[in-house]
Image (spheres, rainbow, N blue to C red):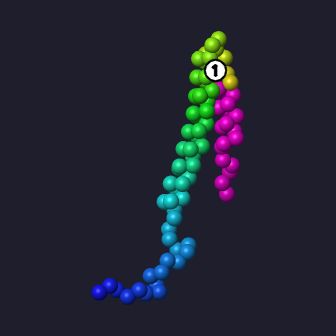
Amino acid sequence: MADPHHASDDYVRGSQEISEQNQTFTAFMGLTKWGSLSLAVLLLFLTLWFQPGGSFFGAAIPAFVLLVAGYFFLKSGKKH
């Protein structure tokens, strides 16, 4: 026979430890954010470098500007 259901076994909202889920979510969001920036910089760099008449330095400068601007837009503020 199955054990009878007790009211004390019910899930109570907010009673579970979520620190590991929070750390996983924070890590995933960080990887997504910075990975997207790095892919955008790489795509811009390669597109400008390999276009007809493109040059290495002509591609490196806009890619660096995007990298710096993206860093300042994506960095998180101070945590309280």
Q: Which residues are magenta?
A: 63-80
Q: Nearer the viewer, residue 43 or 19?
A: 43
Structural crowding at the residue carrying mark 1, measured as other residues with C-alpha within 10 Å and reported as few (<14), some (14–19) or many (≥20): some
**Residue shown at 53%/78% (left/top)?**
12
**Residue shown at 58%/28% (left/top)?**
42
**Whole-percent x and y of residue 8?**
46, 85
Q: Is 44 positioned to the left or the right of 8 in the image?
A: right
**Residue shown at 50%/54% (left/top)?**
24
Identify the amino acid type marked 1.
Leu
Residue that carries the numbered disc 1 in the rendered image: 48
**Residue shown at 59%/17% (left/top)?**
50
**Whole-percent x and y of residue 79?**
66, 54
> Can you tell which quarter of the image residue 49 is in?
top right
Q: Nearer the viewer, residue 9 or 23?
A: 9
Q: Is 17 positioned to the left or the right of 3 in the image?
A: right
**Whole-percent x and y of residue 80?**
67, 57
> Magenta span: helix, strand or loop, mainly?
helix
Q: Nearer the viewer, residue 32 or 50?
A: 50
Helix, strand or loop under label 1: helix
**Whole-percent x and y of residue 14?**
56, 73
Q: Is residue 80 visible?
A: yes
Q: Is residue 77 magenta?
A: yes
Q: Is residue 21 magenta?
A: no
Q: Is residue 57 visible?
A: no
User: In the rendered picture of this protein, how many numbered marks are placed on residues?
Assistant: 1
Q: On screen, 76 above or below 62?
A: below
